Image (spheres, rainbow, N blue to C red):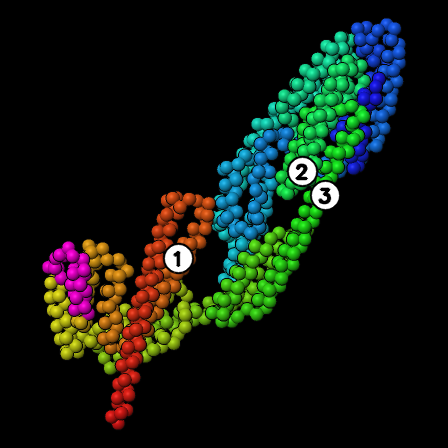
Amino acid sequence: MSEDKEKEPNNEVTETSPETPEMDKKIPAKTAEEGKTAPTEEKVESIVGEENVSPEGNNVEKATLVETVKETETEVVANKEEQTSEPDVIKEIEDTNAEDAEDKDTGKRHEIPLLDYHSMSMENLVGELQKLVKNEKVQAIKKHVDGIREEFNLKYQEFIDQKKEDFVANGGNEIDFRYNSVTKRQFNEVYNDYRDKRNQHYKSLEKSHKENLAYRLELIEEVKGLVNVEEDINTTYKNFKDIQEKWRNAGPIPRANYNDVWKTYQHHIEIFYDFLHINRELRDLDFKHNLEEKLKIVEQAEALAEEPDLNRAFRELQVLHKLWKEDIGPVGRDHREEIWERFSAATKTIHERRQSYFKELDKISEQNLETKNAIIAEILTLSESVSDKHATLQQQIKKLEELRESFFKAGKVPQKDNENTWTSFKNAVRAFNKGKNAFYKNLKKEQQKNLDNKRALLETAISLKESDDWDVATAEMKRIQSEWKKIGHVPRKYSDKLWKEFKAACNHYFDRLHATKNDGFKKEQENLKLKEDCMARLKDFQLSGKKENDLKVIKEFVSEWKTYGHVPYKQKSINQKFNRIIDALFNKLGVSAQEADLLKYGNKIQRLKNDDNQERAIQNERSFIRKKIDESKNEIRQLETNLQFFSNASESNPIVQEVIKKVEVQKESLASWKAKLKKLNVLEHNLNKETEEESTSANEEE
C-alpha cells in the first residue's frame, strides 16, 4: 500500500492530536476491545476479493497489504503508548464543544454578556436574574445564574447578620430572631423557577440523548464491520459514505460520552482508510477534498491571531476545532503532520494571548484586593472611634455606607482570597455596628427616662386645665411648659401624640383664662362678628371670569380676615369654614395648592404675631415645620429608593408612574413647608427688630 494509508503523526504540544484520538473511553467492552485491534491477515485476504485484484498480482497485493496491516497495527499501539494528557487549551475546547453538541442552544451563553454582579445590589441581582430566566434559554445561562446566586448569597448573609445584631442590640434573644425578607423571597421564587425549567429541559433531552448514543455506537459497529464483508469494493465504499451521512444526522448525545464516542468513530474511520484496499482514486479524491477543507480551517485559525476580541477569537477557534473533528475526514499521510502542526501552532498562539490576558486580569484582581483591604482598614479605623454624639454618629454611619458602596464597586478579587476578604469586611462592619448599637442602646434608655418625665408633666397639665385657681394654676402651667422644653428627645413613636396632648391641655387652660377676661372676651366677640360678616360677603361673592380681578378680590378677603384677631374658643371652627370657601374659589381659578396654602398661611403668621407668648408659639411652629420638612425628605428618599427596584421597567408601567407621581407630590409639599419656614423666619426677624428698636428708644429717653 502507499504511504498515504499510514496513520497521522501525533504532533500536538503533548504529542496528542485529534487525528489520532484516544480510543474507546466509556464505550461498551466489546467495542473497545475490537477497536484496539487491526484486521488480521486472514480478514484482509477475504476483503480483497476477485474483482479488485488481478490473479497475477493477487499474492503481491496480499503480501503488501498484510505487511501494511502489521505496520499500522504496530503504529497504533505505539501511538496509544505515547499519548499523554491533552493540553489545557485542547481539553477546554473539547469540553466546551461537548457541551454545545449536547444542546445547540447552550452555545448561546457566549452571546449573553456576563455583567459585574459583584457591584449590584440584592434588588438589582433579583431583577437581572428575572430578566435572564424570562428572556434566555435556560440551558444557556447557567454560568450567569451561578454568578448571580453566589453574589446574592454573600450580600444577603451580610445583610441578615446585621439585622440579627440589631435585634440582639435592642434586647432581643438571638434564638428568637426571625426576619422576613421580601427580596430573598423574590430571589428564591425566580431561582426555583430557573431550576425547575432547567431540570425539565434536561429531563426531556435525556431519552433522545440515550437513543442517539446507542445509534451512534451502532454506526461505529457498522464502520468496523466494513472491513469484514466480502463484496464489491465500490459497494463497500458507498456503504461507508452512507454511514458517514447517517453519522452527521444522528443527533446530540450526552456530553460525558461526546469526546470518547467521536474519538472511537474517527479511529475506525482511519482504520477503514488505512486497511481497506479501496479504489485509490476515490480515496485520493477524499484526501484532496479533506486537505482543502482543513487548509481553509488552518487559514481561518491563523487569521484569528489578529482578532482583537479574545473571547470572540476563542469561540471561533472552538468552532474550527469542531469542524476539524466532526465534519472533515483524514488527509494523506504526507500532509498530516504539516497541516496539524499549523493548526496546532495557530491554536497555541491564541491560547498564549488568552493566558496573557488572564494574567492581566489577575493583576487587576490583585489591585482590587489591595483596594478592598484599604477600605476594610478604613472601616476598622472608623469602628475604633465610634462617636457618642448623635449628629456625629450619623455622619459616621453615612461614611460607612459610602465605604460599603466603594467596597462593592472595587471589583472582583482572586478567587482564593474572596472568602477571606468577605469575612474581614463583615467583621469590620460588625465592629462598627457593635459600637453604634451600644450608643443607641444607651440613648434608648435616656429617651425612656425623658418619656417618663414628659408623661408626668402631661398628667400635671391635664389636672390643671379645668382649674379656677388662676394665679396658682397659671404659674404652674408656665413652669411645666418651661420644664418640657428642657427635657430631651423621647422615642419617635410617642413624640407626636405626647406633644399634642400636652399642647391641647395647656391651650385649653389658657383659652379659658383668656375667656375670663372681660375685655378680651368682648374683643373676641367683636372679632367673631367681623369674621361672620366677612365670610357672609365671601359666600355672596361671584367670580367674574377675569382671573386677575377675581384673584385680587379673594386676596383682599384674605388680607381682611388677617386683620381680625381671636374668636371665642367654641367658635374657632369659623376659620376652617373660611379656608374651605377660599380653597374652593382658588380651585375654580386654577391656583396651585402650594400658592393657596401660602396665602392662607398668612392667617397663621398673624395669629402667631398676636399670641400672648410669641416666643413659645413661634418656637413650636418652627419645630412643627421642620418635622414636616424631615418627613417629606424621608418620604422622597424612600420613594426614589423604591424606583431603583424598577430599574428594568418601562416608565409607562402603572406602578412606576404611581411612584413618580407620589415623588412629585412630596416635592411640592416640601417646597411649601420650606416657604412657610421662610415666612416664619421673616416674622421672627421683624419681631426681634421691633424689640431692639423699642429697647433703643427706651434707653434714649432715659
Task: Out of 169 and 240, give the one closest to the viewer.
Answer: 240
Front disc: 1 or 2: 2
Classify mark 3: residues with Cα within 10 Å, few (<14), some (14-19) or many (20+).
few
Numbered label attached to residue 636:
1
Location of mark 2 (residue): 304
| Occupied quadrant, residue 563 | bottom left
Examine the structure image and report whether residue 557 is included in the region drawn in magenta: yes
In the foreground, 566 or 444: 566
Q: 127 left or right of 266?
A: left
Give residue 547's quadrant in the image: bottom left
Whole-percent x and y of residue 697? Answer: 26, 88
Amino acid at dot 3: Glu
Give the residue number, with chain letter if any, for mark 3.
352
Mark 3 or mark 1: whose residue is earlier in sequence: 3
Q: Position of residue 447 (x, y in %)?
A: 43, 69
Judged by its main secondary structure, the magenta piece is: helix
Question: Which amino acid does the dot numbered 1 rest on?
Answer: Ile
Q: Which quarter shows the N terminus?
A: top right
Answer whether labels 3 and 2 touch (C-beta < 8 Å).
no
Q: Which residues lie in the magenta part?
A: 538-562
Q: Quadrant of residue 146?
A: top right
- The image shows residue 191, relative to residue 491, as above or below, that is above
